[in-house]
Amino acid sequence: MLDTAIKNQLSSHFSTLTGDIELVLALDDTNKSNELQALTDDLASLSERIRISTNNDEQARRPSMTVTGEQGTAIAFAGVPMGHEFTSLILAILHSGGVATKADAAQVEQIKALDKELNFEIYISLSCQTCPGVVQALNTMAALNTEITTTMIDGALFQEEVEARNIMAVPTVYLNGEVFSQGAISLNDILAKVDAGASARQAELLNEKDPYDVLVVGGGPAGASAAIYAARKGLRTGVVAERFGGQVADTLAIENFISVKATEGPKLVAQLEEHVKDYDVDVIDNQRASRLYSDNGNHIELENGATLTAKAVILATGARWREMNVPGEREYRGRGVAYCPHCDGPLFKGKPVAVIGGGNSGIEAAIDLANIVEQVTVLEFADTLRADEVLVRKAQSMANITIIKSAQTTEVLGDGNKVTALAYTDRNTGEQHQLSIAGVFVQIGLVPNTEWLKESGVTLSKFGEIEVDNRGATNVEGVYAAGDATNSAFKQIIIAMGSGATASLGAFDYLIRHGQE
């Protein structure tokens, strides 16, 4: 099942195992079980420390594999963990076999101190790029504490469970049978939820940090670029971000990043983070900024109560998907209303869905979904599509894509548990219509993440974008901004990176001209 190159690479990784691993299989007579058996055989052939056994429990999910370590740790995969989850499987084997995790010393201590049974179930799709981060965070906990168990569940394969639990978005995490989280969640955030005192302890540590020369708020392309340029100037630099990589982490294919013919969002994010950490940059992730104020320097308050101080601040908080703001949207978010077709599309296999928006993202989503779902209906508010002609032609050539223009979405309808229909009005005739659908994918542009700046004194445009000059400076002394959160004309990765460099150089110029050492 695995090719020679991958086997050679894994053989090298598995040579670092210090403990024995048992791969416990629960199989049936399906093709997926045969695939899992073949994968397991390949893995076991690469190390004498890996052996295979059978799970005879009739209640076990089939097909599934449980990675068990010598200390009694258990990390399970229900389905065939390939695609984006293959890395999760390999890391589970390595960590269960004694290879150190990437958790820092404080996280390791906190995980090992948890003294209650925690059984996590993570529903994923193999095409979801957000899911592996959640799976790997929880698997890290399970590898370090025998009281914690995890099971990755391929929602496309275990459809009956998905429908029984009304799961309409991934990743969805259950803890001890109850919904724990939905969407991206970091290891720190997980620990904060299961360990009540974690947030206060973390805030105390952050409050002790010395002031920065430059503090970058945001860890996307603009923030990473700004941090690198500041660090290269020898400035004491910090980055505080809710999630390193930002929206890029949710991007599937990137084909317009000059000098790189093609890449994927998570891969680019990993490279950005690695590049930033090559420099002496203090990266503080999993933290959300809540307030900016100036008083003897610039201060960033965080939601956990900590405050960070810097001589200059660069705001690079990016943007998020715009909502329709119609009745039913928020009520059914995660239960049929979705914003990531790559992540959640497989959950709607064989069902009718709608895509809201006729720009590039909307038409690309329709094309992507058409290979999975029964029928895609695209609703565009304007009387023309804004997507590139090549995408429009492709969509029009697909038999199960219908495009309706001059359509104003008015309501998302459901049965209390999940989406069942979408209401819209024909803007030309005023006639009202209903579509019977199982899911709605909203693709209508971006909203800057700047609400927290409304009382800061920083000038925002009528669209909520931070207004900057050609050096990235805002109207507040010592405060700069870059990327999709600003009034830049175009929202592109390469433009965000350039504006991050500009803002950083602008901040450096500000510091040297104001007598800062």
Image (cartoon, helix red, strand yellow):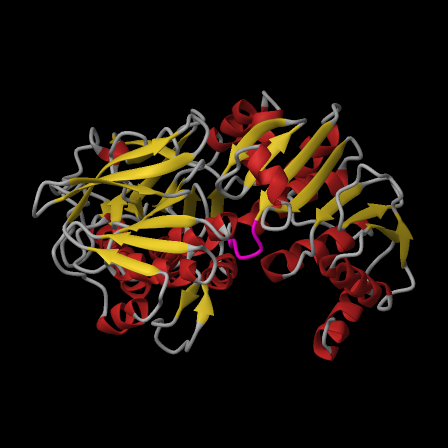
What range is drawn magenta here? 125-129
Q: Nearer the viewer, residue 500 or 492?
A: 492
Residue at 30% in and 61% down: 363
- Answer above or below: position of 150 versus 25: above
Q: Nearer the viewer, residue 359 or 227?
A: 359
Compared with 422, 95 (above or below) is: below
Q: Can you give x and y, in whole percent of width and height, for residue 99 in the image?
A: 77, 53
Can residue 155 be seen at all in this image of the molecule? Answer: yes
In the visual, does 301 lie left or right of 174?
A: left
406 vs 57: above or below = below
Q: Position of residue 497 (x, y in %)?
A: 32, 62
Q: Is residue 435 magenta?
A: no
Quadrant of residue 7 within the rendered picture = bottom right
Q: Nearer the viewer, residue 314 or 433?
A: 433
Whole-percent x and y of residue 115? 75, 24
- Main secondary-structure element of the magenta-colored stretch: loop
Total tally of numbered discs in the picture: 0
171 relative position to 56: left or right? left
Dividing the picture into quadrants, the one containing residue 463 is top left
Task: State the image coordinates of residue 187 (x, y, percent, origin top left).
Answer: 58, 39
Report the side of 505 relative to 68 (left or right).
left
- Write the residue at 67% across / 56% down: 81
